[in-house]
Amino acid sequence: QVQLVESGGGLVQPGGSLTLSCAASGISLNRYTVRWLRQAPGEKREEVSCISTTVGSVYYEDSVNGRFTISRDSARDTVLLQMNSLKPEDTAVYHCNGDLTRYSGGVYYTDNYWGQGTQVTVSS
């Protein structure tokens, strides 16, 4: 059974930092495109950052660009989201999502997995 597990959330003051980690059992995250998405109460879920399996291919949503850094720890098969200069508007539940498209027998298949999420609260 595949499980994605996020960790590293918590309560932090504005301007502070947190590092979120996404780990998986049952699959190798090193083979997957991994996204971090967040959802605040009453808001739509939004993609914050993404890292593909192509070295150097990353994406950041405009509001976090320059403050967040996504990376892989290939040895530990995890994906990290370093969050600096946190703002109250960063408060949300952060989920990681793993996505792999494979081709077999003339058909494309997509494997897609979600974690349960970790709460990030930025408040003084």
Image (cartoon, grey):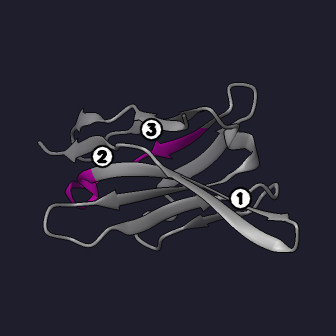
Choose between 23 and 72: the one closer to the eye: 23
Q: Amino acid at mark 3?
A: Leu
- Of circles 2 and 1, which is in front? 1
Q: Quadrant of the C terminus?
A: top left
- Of circles 3 and 2, which is in front? 3
Task: Look at the image and give the residue range highlighted in magenta.
Answer: 79-92
**Mark 3 lies on residue:** 20
> What residue is rendered at 38% in x and 69% in y?
46
Choose between 4 and 41: the one closer to the eye: 4
Kindly indicate whether the residue at mark 2 contacts the one at mark 3 (C-beta within 8 angstroms). Answer: no
If you read the primary sequence from the N terminus, does the residue marked by circle 2 or circle 1 appear first?
2
Query: Helix, strand or loop at disc 2?
Result: loop
Image height of 117 relative to 105, above or below: above
If you read the primary sequence from the N terminus, does the residue marked by circle 1 or circle 3 appear first?
3
Kindly indicate whether the residue at mark 1 contacts the one at mark 2 (C-beta within 8 angstroms). Answer: no
Alpha-carbon neighbours of circle 3 within 10 Å: few (<14), some, or many (≥20)? Answer: many
**Mark 1 lies on residue:** 52
